[in-house]
Image (cartoon, rainbow, N blue to C red):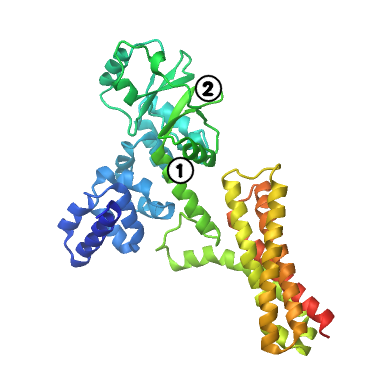
């Protein structure tokens, strides 16, 4: 059984214990799970059962669990916690995790938590908070180990032993000068295999380029993916080492980006609670439905313009949905490809014209191919070659326009600093519906009446 199956099995058994009232066994099982597993369980439970599980959770791990749940669930749990319990829960957290939580905590709690930290930790926390959460500085952990290049490995070993522990996920330490500016990286695996009398400068690697603190989270993901990193130093504009990012931070960011793309495509928030009150959920979804309704009225107004044509040639109403449907699928394919290319920084001024020509050519080729199929099927169905020709021509027009729209919409939204995943789909649907109906009914009015 792999770890994922084991996790699912643990959660299933815990639910069974809760259902049968075996609270003691449930408490033991619950507190043996990893905080991320507990967070997954809490998100999967209705609010009454969630509150029950939270009550039997070990207070020592409450802070770690709060980091793992989505924002709505976290807010719900925090609201039900006494101030003293909340302060105790977040007091011993890692500074980068604490920084993520502070925005969700009541102001009085935030003030007490910050005041409980020693001066050095307060400065480190402030260092993380000065960066936006979607930057390398917002992702970094300020608990790092640095050494000078002119000391021996024996000195480094004695220094590490004197620390008593190492930051989680440490695979290397960073070499800095007297101004704390980054010079290179020393990997622990190489240190262990090198003579203790060797200077740090003799085995440090200068191949790793540090990540700027203001770099976007997407840039961080790209760096780790293409350079196969386990960790990387983060530096400010002066080259001073301010923290490090580890691969587990990047995996969390990749997951968050995937959830964001999936949920925002239909106007939802990835931080939402699946068990939120009905009215709250309805209001959130109503905005997106309202936008969609307006675009539907726009498409309907185009159809209304050709009402006389439809009245005279009823067959057009039967075939009308085909054209915008095919255009919508073709446009979505282009939209998805371009949105992904933007996320991976694979598209720029130099290659954009070539990509556009390619998408238009694909739209035209597929338009001709499927228009021929639909035209032939229409002729066999209604025994009228004119209708087959009209729908075929309308499909070609709409699929070419859809390819252009699928290419240009993400670029325009990105230029406007808007998320292409959030508004791209609804804009594309509007374009393919309007152009599809207009082309089909317009050609029908021109050649069939």
Relative vertical location of residue 1 with respect to residue 132 in this rendering, above or below: below
Q: Which mark is residue 239?
A: 2
Residue 395 in the image: x percent, y percent?
A: 71, 72
Compared to residue 379, the image places residue 323 above or below, namely above
Q: Nearer the viewer, residue 188 or 351?
A: 351
Q: Secondary structure at mark 1?
A: loop
Question: Which residue is more in the foreground, 118 or 417?
Answer: 417
Q: Position of residue 409 (x, y in %)?
A: 68, 55
Q: Taking 180 as reference, is 91 left or right? A: left
Which label belongs to residue 370? none
Q: Which residue is mark 1?
A: 103
Q: Residue 154's spot in the image, x, y percent?
A: 29, 13
Residue lying at 67% horizontally and 43% vertically, measured from the top left: 348
Can residue 302 be seen? no
Q: Is residue 428 above or below residue 298?
A: above
Residue density around tag 1, few if under 14, some if 14–19, many if 20 or more, within 10 Å: few
Is 58 drawn above or below residue 189 in the view shown? Answer: below
Using the rendered view, name the quadrant where residue 332 is placed. Answer: bottom right
Q: Nearer the viewer, residue 404 or 392?
A: 392
Q: Mark 2 vs mark 1: give the one in front.
A: 2
Identity of the residue drawn at 44% across and 41% down: 250
Mark 2 Cα within 10 Å, few/some/many (few <14, many 20+)? some
Quarter of the figure that contains the C terminus: bottom right
**Quarter of the N terminus within the rendering:** bottom left
Q: Residue at x 33, y 62 (%)?
A: 45
Q: Earlier in the sequence, mark 2 or mark 1?
A: 1
**Quarter-of-image position of residue 166:** top left
Q: Are marks 2 and 1 in contact (CB under 8 Å)?
A: no
Kindly state the secondary structure of the residue where label 2 is placed.
loop
What percent of the width, then of the height, locates residue 145? 37, 23
Disc 2 and disc 1: Cα gap in Å?
A: 28 Å
Left or right: 419 as drawn, with respect to 11: right
């Amino acid at each position: 059984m792999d770890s994922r199956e084991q996790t699912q099995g643990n959660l299933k058994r815990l639910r069974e214990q809760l259902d049968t009232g075996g609270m003691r066994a449930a408490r033991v099982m619950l507190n043996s799970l990893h905080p991320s597993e507990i967070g997954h369980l809490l998100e999967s439970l209705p609010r009454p059962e969630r509150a029950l599980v939270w009550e039997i959770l070990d207070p020592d791990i409450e802070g770690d669990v709060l980091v793992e749940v989505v924002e709505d669930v976290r807010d719900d749990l925090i609201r039900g916690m006494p101030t003293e319990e909340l302060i105790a829960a977040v007091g011993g957290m890692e500074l980068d995790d604490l920084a993520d939580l502070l925005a969700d905590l009541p102001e009085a709690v935030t003030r007490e938590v910050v005041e409980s930290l020693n001066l050095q930790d307060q400065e480190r926390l402030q260092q993380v908070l000065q960066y936006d959460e979607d930057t390398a500085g917002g992702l970094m952990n300020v608990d790092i180990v640095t050494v000078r290049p002119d000391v021996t490995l024996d000195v480094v070993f004695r220094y590490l032993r004197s620390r008593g522990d190492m930051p989680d996920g440490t695979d290397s330490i960073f070499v800095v000068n007297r101004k704390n500016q980054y010079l290179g990286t020393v990997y622990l695996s190489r240190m262990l295999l090198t003579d203790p009398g060797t200077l740090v400068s003799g085995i440090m690697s200068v191949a790793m380029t540090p990540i700027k603190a203001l770099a976007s989270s997407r840039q961080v993901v790209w760096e780790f993916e293409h350079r196969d990193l386990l960790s990387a130093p983060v530096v400010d504009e002066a080259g001073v080492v301010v923290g490090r990012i580890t691969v587990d931070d990047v995996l969390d960011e990749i997951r968050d980006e995937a959830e964001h793309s999936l949920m925002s495509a239909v106007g939802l928030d990835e931080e939402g609670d699946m068990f939120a009150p009905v009215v709250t959920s309805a209001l959130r979804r109503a905005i997106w439905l309202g936008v969609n309704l307006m675009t539907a009225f726009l498409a309907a107004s185009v159809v209304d313009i050709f009402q006389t044509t439809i009245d005279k040639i009823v067959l057009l109403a039967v075939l009308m949905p085909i054209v915008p449907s095919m255009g919508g699928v073709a446009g979505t394919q282009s939209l998805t490809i371009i949105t992904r290319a933007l996320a991976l920084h694979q598209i720029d001024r130099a290659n954009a014209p070539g990509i556009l020509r390619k998408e238009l050519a694909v739209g035209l080729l597929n338009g001709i191919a499927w228009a021929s199929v639909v035209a032939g099927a229409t002729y066999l169905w209604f025994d009228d070659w004119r209708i087959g020709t009209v729908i075929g021509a309308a499909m070609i027009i709409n699929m070419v326009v859809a390819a252009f729209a699928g290419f240009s919409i993400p670029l325009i939204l990105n230029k406007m600093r808007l998320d292409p995943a959030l508004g791209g789909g609804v804009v594309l649907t509007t374009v393919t519906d309007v152009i599809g109906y207009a082309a089909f009914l317009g050609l029908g009015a021109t050649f069939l009446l």
